[in-house]
Amino acid sequence: MFNQNLFTVAGDNARRDVNLSTLQPIVNVELDDGWSIGTSEMTIVYDWQSSEFVALPVGIKLSKLLAPK
């Protein structure tokens, strides 16, 4: 799990404060014969100011590793 927290510490009072958390789950499971499955491009964003998720994507990848001949 990769986590970042972004928040306002100073700046123009006329601008909206920023208070966001981003989570990126990183999962990869090896399967037989060089195949694997995992998460892809899933950056979940939660806005603490509005108390809601602003991005809740679902990304799944399936890959095959090929050896050179």
Image: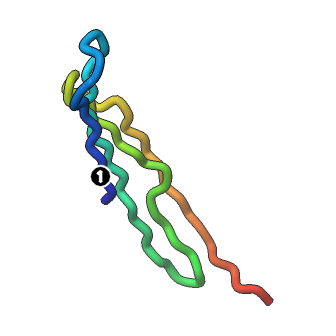
**Quarter of image, res 2:** bottom left
**Where does the image place residue 57, in percent across and percent down from the top left?**
42, 40
Q: Amino acid at mark 1?
A: Asn
41 is higher (above) or lower (below) than 49: below
* Residue located 59% across and 81% down the image: 34
Q: Is residue 34 above or below residue 20?
A: below
Q: Residue at x 59, y 84 (%)?
A: 33
Could you tell me residue 52's position as x and y percent?
Answer: 24, 28
Q: Nearer the viewer, residue 33 or 59?
A: 59
Of all residues, the one furthest to the front in this rendering is: 11
Q: Measured along the vertical axis of the image, is residue 28 above or below residue 51? A: below
Percent coordinates x, y for residue 1 in the rendering:
31, 59
Residue 3 x/y as whole percent: 29, 52
Residue in the foreground of this view, choosing between 20 and 8:
8
The residue indicated by pointer 1 is 3
Which residue is at the far top? 14
